[in-house]
Image (spheres, coloured by chain):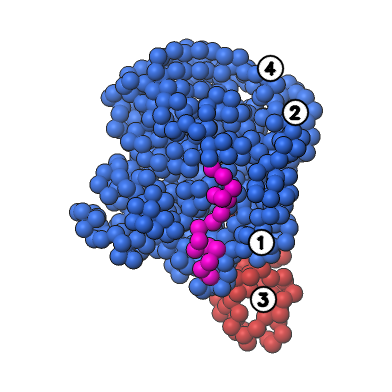
Amino acid sequence: MYGYNGKILRVNLTDRSIKVEALDEAKARKYIGGRGLGTRMMMDEVDPSVDALSPANKLMIVTGPLTGTATPTGGRYMAVTKSPLTGTIASSNSGGYFGAELKFAGWDAIILEGKASAPVYMNVVDDTVELLDAAPLWGKALSETTDALEAAHGAKARILAIGPAGERLSLLAAIMNDRWRAAGRSGVGAVMGSKNLKAIVVKGSGKVAVADEAALKDAFAVCMRKIKDNGVTGTGLPTYGTAVLVNIINENGVFPTNNFQEAVFDKAEDISGEALAEKYLKKKDPCFRCPIACGRYCEVDDVKGGGPEYETIWAFGGDCGVSSLGEIIKANYWCNEYGLDTISAGATLAAAMELYQRGLVKKADFGDGPALEFGNADSIVEWTKRMGRVEGFGAKLAQGSYRLCESYGVPELSMTVKKQELPAYDPRGIMGHGVQYATSNRGGCHVRGYMISPEILGLPEKLDRLETAGKPGWAKVFQDFTAAIDSVGLCLFTSFAMGADDYAALYNAVCGGGITGADFVTAGERIWNLEKRYNLAAGIGPDQDTLPPRLLEEPVPAGPSKGLVHPLAKMLPEYYSLRGWDAKGVPTEAKLKALGL
Amino acid sequence: MKVEARLFATLREGRGKVLGIELPEGATVADLAARLTIGRKDIAILLVGGRDAALDKPLSDGDVVSIFPPVGGG
Ligand code: SF4
């Protein structure tokens, strides 16, 4: 087999059995790998109605066929499971070096089942797999965990781990790898914690077999040229990282501020990518074989490490009304240390701030901690720590903004879709992005179809962000295309520069076979529909394809998007129809059949 | 008339962040860009009052013009 190793590692943590299984090649090709293959295996093996934090749920760490190959950004893996936060299928993507190392060790995926009776970690050295005692690591933050595992297994080992947030089942817990890379969203870290699995250590000495080395060299050269020539991937992201978006999104009047009460942050300049580069950036921190190198490494006071990303700066910054970039970097650091999703963590603090603003949360609720009030920079650092340790009021925060707001009788103040926090773009001023948010198969998310690219950045072409016509179709294509990229093992950021034919060329060179760009996107559509089916079977129906009431009913108060709400009801029917789904938003038999489902 | 030019990322180098610029009546965004010696290929996102604008858009007194070079995503 080319591209794929042909081997899956199945580990049952309850009875500690370790099995080697052959990868079903037909299935792999049909669903590509990563997100698609993981979803297929979830559908085949895990009852969608299962309690996500019970031993019956499974956690799948799945690479793509291009993971570990000489392709630009070919180092990604996906954590696929049922989400305890949303109740939907979850698939969280991460870069760094872990995914490639897993391929070098000879595996395409790890399927984790059951629950260990006491904390364990897994050590994988090529074919040798063992479960080891993790009691000394339990409760430890990421640096300490990683240091200890490197000391035990060598500095060359690649390490994936959860922090205290995952151990204590925070629904905002991430799976971390390579210290500060995160499969961040949908609470995948809590699933790992629920299995009493602290970490996976991998060392591999193999290499991924490639079908046609000469063709790969050619396709690689074409893609590299496109990446270098593109302003975003060739200059913008390498120079400023994702944080450069702060000013772009704010100038467009769609930068959610104070829990989406406003859409312009008057102190955006203080937390901008330009300010980050000037004051705190120490170096770039690229993932495996990445020519873009958007990753940042920053230092402030006694804190240093990876990030912060744009989304993080927004969540702890604008969304909390905080203008101290230094404190935002610290909050980001504690998210990485304790293993929290930075988007949901920051956005949950913002929701708590609105509860306090409205007098629903009282000062006494904060105990000896600082009041969570908009603009209070100290509070974001302290409460991120307590959220990560799941202690005191932090335990409430650790359940996410939906459950927090619901406990005060005001779930509508949670800026979530399907209970997952929305990222850093106010859809009231970006019409296609709103459709994408509402229909995302894992709830509030920007990387299920990054409509910001055409609607704000002008890639591949500039669309008017306020126009509704044509947008449902754009959102659908972006969602399908993204599902395929997430499955093949490359970083979504390559898509600023590369088209479907480029991915197909890389896939064909590595795996053999003659798929076209259109086949690639169709595979993405198949994956999207499969995810939808999983969600429907899990009881997450089309009634949840919506936006928080604030975004549908309360006009943006000021700025370039003043007066706007999101006209979702007008746009959804067209989206469903373009998907070949019925008017209620359920895939039709004919559509599923056409996609081979 | 006087407009406010807001420059971002690399466009700030040698120019500054926020500039008040006097322009003759009827001047367009292109005239403003020329005054600031910003070439067309360095303009990726162009906003007047936070809304997408074309280079030939005529400016009015008090307009806020935001100009970004090809930059990010995230
Ligand atoms: S573009 Fe950024 S996130 Fe993507 S692989 Fe490169 S460094 Fe990692």
Residue at x 47% of width, y 67% of height: A262
Q: Nearer the viewer, mark 1 or mark 4?
A: 1
Mark 3 burial class by Cα count in 10 Å: few <14, some 14-19, many 20+: many
- Judging by colour alone, the chain drawn in red in this rendered image is B
Residue at x 44% of width, y 18% of height: A12
Q: Which mark is on residue B32?
A: 3
- Quarter assignment of residue B55: bottom right
Mark 2 burial class by Cα count in 10 Å: few <14, some 14-19, many 20+: many
User: Which type of secondary structure does the marked residue at label 2 adopt?
Assistant: helix
Locate residue A425, reporting x and y percent.
Answer: 54, 58
Q: Which residue is mark 1?
A: A570
- Amino acid carrying label 3: it is Leu
- Amino acid carrying label 4: it is Met
Q: Are marks 1 and 4 on the same chain?
A: yes
What chain does badge 1 belong to? A
Does the residue tagged 1 have its C-beta within 8 Å of any atom of ligand 1?
no
- Decide which of tag 2 and tag 4 comes sooner along the chain: 4
Tell me the CA gap for discs 4 and 3: 59 Å
User: Which type of secondary structure does the marked residue at label 3 adopt?
Assistant: helix
Q: Which residue is mark 2?
A: A508
Q: Is residue A550 magenta?
A: yes
Tag count in the figure? 4
If the image is split into quadrants, where does the C terminus of chain A sit?
A: top right
Q: Is residue A260 above or below residue A219?
A: below
Q: Are marks 1 and 3 on the same chain?
A: no
Q: Which residue is mark 4?
A: A1
Magenta residues span A540-556
User: Which type of secondary structure does the marked residue at label 4 adopt?
Assistant: loop
